[in-house]
Image (tube, rainbow, N blue to C red):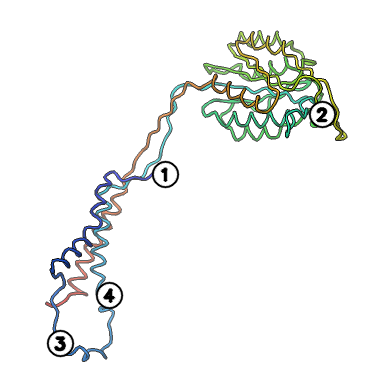
Amino acid sequence: MIFRFAHPLVLALLPLPPLLWLVSRWLGWRWEAPSLRYSDTRLLAGLPVSWRVRLRRLPDVLRLLAWLLLVVGLARPQSGRSQDIIQGQGVDIVLALDISGSMAGLDFQPQNRLEAAKSVIADFVAGREFDRIGLVVFASDAFQLVPPTLDYPALLRSLGSVRLANELGIGDATAIGQGLATAANMMRTSAAASKVIILLTDGANTAGNFDPITAAQAVATLDMRVYTIGIGKPGLVPFLDSNGNTITVESDLDEATLGAIADTADGRYFRAEDAADLQQIYEQIDALERSDVEKQVFVRWQEQAWVLLWGGLAALILERVLRHSVFQVVP
């Protein structure tokens, strides 16, 4: 709900009555009604005070209230509700995330690779506004978690629940081609002008029914762009085994294949060796894939002055009636 005054300058009239009173006092003018004079007012000290005397200022209060209501009403208070009109079209994006066991690598301290990727992806999603975003995870097979959607809170909840393949009890391998094909299938019927897949992995293709390059060629024919991200430091990488012991495993990132996928599908390949690199990569992709969308805000205003004007008129009428009846003074 939005509130405004159509003519706010009218509100400058509000302090006019007290200003007139102060000026009249300074000039010596008298606004009080004539009164009777007694030689000694102590003669009235014992008389009871009636309710009329106690409320004798009520007409003055009503007149002041009428003034306030009428002035505020003339300023035309308005309430409205805003409505966003979206013009143009957003981008459809599918995030393909590797959850194989190697994503437990501890070279992205203080988090492991998977948790670091989830954190950066969450920031990426939060930075979009009009784009439908979906989520696919893959290990020995690929799984569609969230179809392209504008419901970012639901997407982020699903992203937060993602776990490593061995924790979920599914095969611990890396099906890059399968993950890419599953992401493409998710956008197969999309009418978006721009369709993008962002594939993140730390290994080589070791499972699945699809060769990564063949899958990239199929994706390219569907006018989808693929950005590939390889994460992990080269050489020996520390991991925690199932017993909680730290072991070292040789990194097996296949940069050649990831680069070929990106080249085939008109995208780019990025390498991230720490969380800062990963953050910068998603920021670059965010800048490259911007929505061709304009947002216009329309507000439907509704007049609220009538309530104040009717209230002011009622207060003024009541003031005149009381002043010439119950609170009438002589002369």
In the picture of the structure, the residue carrying the numbered disc 4 is 55
Q: Nearer the viewer, mark 2 or mark 1?
A: 2
- Going from N to C along the chain, the mark reached first, 2 or 1, is 1
Mark drawn on residue 288: none
| Structural distance between the alpha carbons of marks 2 and 1 | 53 Å
- Going from N to C along the chain, the mark reached first, 2 or 4, is 4
Say what amino acid the circle numbered 3 marks: Tyr
- What element does badge 3 sit on? loop
In the picture of the structure, the residue carrying the numbered disc 2 is 239
What residue is drawn where x is 62% and y is 34%? Answer: 154
| Structural distance between the alpha carbons of marks 3 and 2 | 103 Å
- Going from N to C along the chain, the mark reached first, 1 or 4, is 1
- Can you give x and y, in whole percent of width and height, for residue 218 in the image? 65, 9
Q: Choose top left, top right, bottom left or bottom right for residue 322.
A: bottom left
- Can you give x and y, in whole percent of width and height, for residue 113 in the image? 73, 28
Say what amino acid the circle numbered 4 marks: Leu
- Going from N to C along the chain, the mark reached first, 4 or 3, is 3
Mark 1, Cα crowd under 10 Å, few <14 / some 14-19 / many 20+, is few
